[in-house]
Amino acid sequence: MNTTLEILTKFLYKTADDQLIIGHRNSEWTGIGPILEEDIAFSSIAQDKIGHAYSIYSILHEQLNQGIPDIIGFTRNENEFWSCQLVEHPIGEYDFSLVRHFLFDNAEFIRFNELSNCTYEPLAKLSNKIKGEIKYHVFHADSWMSQLANGTEESKNRIQIAINTLLPIAFSIFEPIENESELQTNFSITSELELQTKWFALISEKLNSWGYSLPINFDLTQHLGGRNGKHTPFLQPLIVEMTEVFRLDPEAKW
Amino acid sequence: MNILSLDPRVNRMELDENKNPYVENVVAKQENWHTYEVFHQKRKGMQHIHVGIVHAPSSELALSFAKEQYARRGETANLWVVKSTDIVASDYADTDIFSTTPEKTFREASGYKVMDKINAYKKSQKES
């Protein structure tokens, strides 16, 4: 991986892959959400993520000579997905999915706000367009985190346990791709480290204000590898399920 | 577990199946969620129009749910949510206070006979 365009291609892939995998994961709640209103809201947010993945795959197709979105989304093997490990973990109980939604979407909010100022125009334009959707995703997640902090002892404990489990994994969002500094130089794309610093300050402030605590002394490195195709055993079954219909007839017109 | 209702909240309460949960008021006692009325504004400056309700444990989440239920298609400028219990309504038993209103046609625009005057004015403008 050498040229700037190759690095940009990988960057777009990993960004889109995060969207596709979290979108598919969260859609598993459709029909079994805790209450009707939440089922609708959470499903809609998951659908937005698939839409974001589609838009980024479209940039890859139209600008960077990659296959059409359906092909590049549905025909790669597990080790060719560059998504982070956070997004592939199973949905667990609702506390787990909510906390992941909170950690992921606050990162997304910062990321796409920054990307709307980058100099790679197709991406800046798209980021500007979807910023509002992500603002809503954060509003939804934050409202629940605050609500459950002030609910019962059980609700607060369950969220706290999920935070303790998920925070170390969430750092995988910011695992950089190789030579990412090229992207800063050529397209003013913010580095993962800078995003991570901003994100950690933001979520720490929010979690503290709701009365949650942050785990200390955890290993940030043990959940890395996703950006190089190294995944947990949870990803492959997800891909098999996600592509099930597509594989019946890859030539089908929809 | 016996399925008493399609609403999972009702099933979680392990109610006595011989009692109707709504008639016995058990749901209301154990339920800490509220009903919110949702008002939707299409464009800034237009009036907010009542579109329905959502159930939510807080006004913030009510807004969050209202956005997906009532503002997922078409244009939206703004949403209001109001706790249903904060709405003050007239009593249907007092509907007779409105009963003579339909007869007061003099309050309706159609009660005014103005076309003669308008036509006379137009005619005078032409002639002058």
Image (tube, helix red, strand yellow):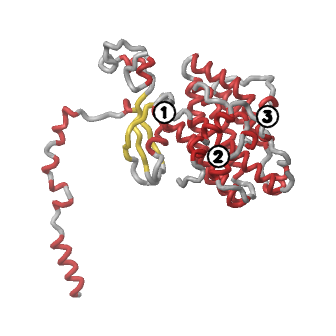
In the visual, does B11 lie left or right of A3? left
Q: Between residues A245 and A223, which one lies in front from this camera angle?
A: A245
Residue A4 visible in the shown view:
yes
Query: Residue A22 bears which disc, if any?
Result: none
In what element is the residue under mark 1?
loop
Q: Disc 2 or 3, which lies upstream in sequence? A: 2
Give the residue drawn at x 79%, y 56%. A187
The chain carrying label 1 is A
First reached walking from the N terminus: tag 1 or tag 2: 1
Location of mark 3 (residue): A224
CA gap, disc 1 and disc 2: 24 Å
Could you tell me which residue is drawn at 59 percent across and 46 percent down?
A246
| Residue shown at 57% from the left, 25% from the top | A148
Proximity of marks 1 and 2: CB atoms separated by less than 8 Å: no
Q: Is residue B38 above or below residue A95?
A: below
Q: Which mark is residue A31?
A: 1
Task: Identify the element where label 3 is drawn.
Answer: loop
Tell me where residue B85 appears, x and y as whole percent: 37, 30
Element carrying mark 2: helix
**Image coordinates for residue A197, horizontal then vertical, percent:** 78, 38
Amino acid carrying label 1: it is Gly
Say which mark, if any, is on residue A74: 2
Disc 3 crowd, CA 10 A, few/some/many (<14, 14-19, 20+): many
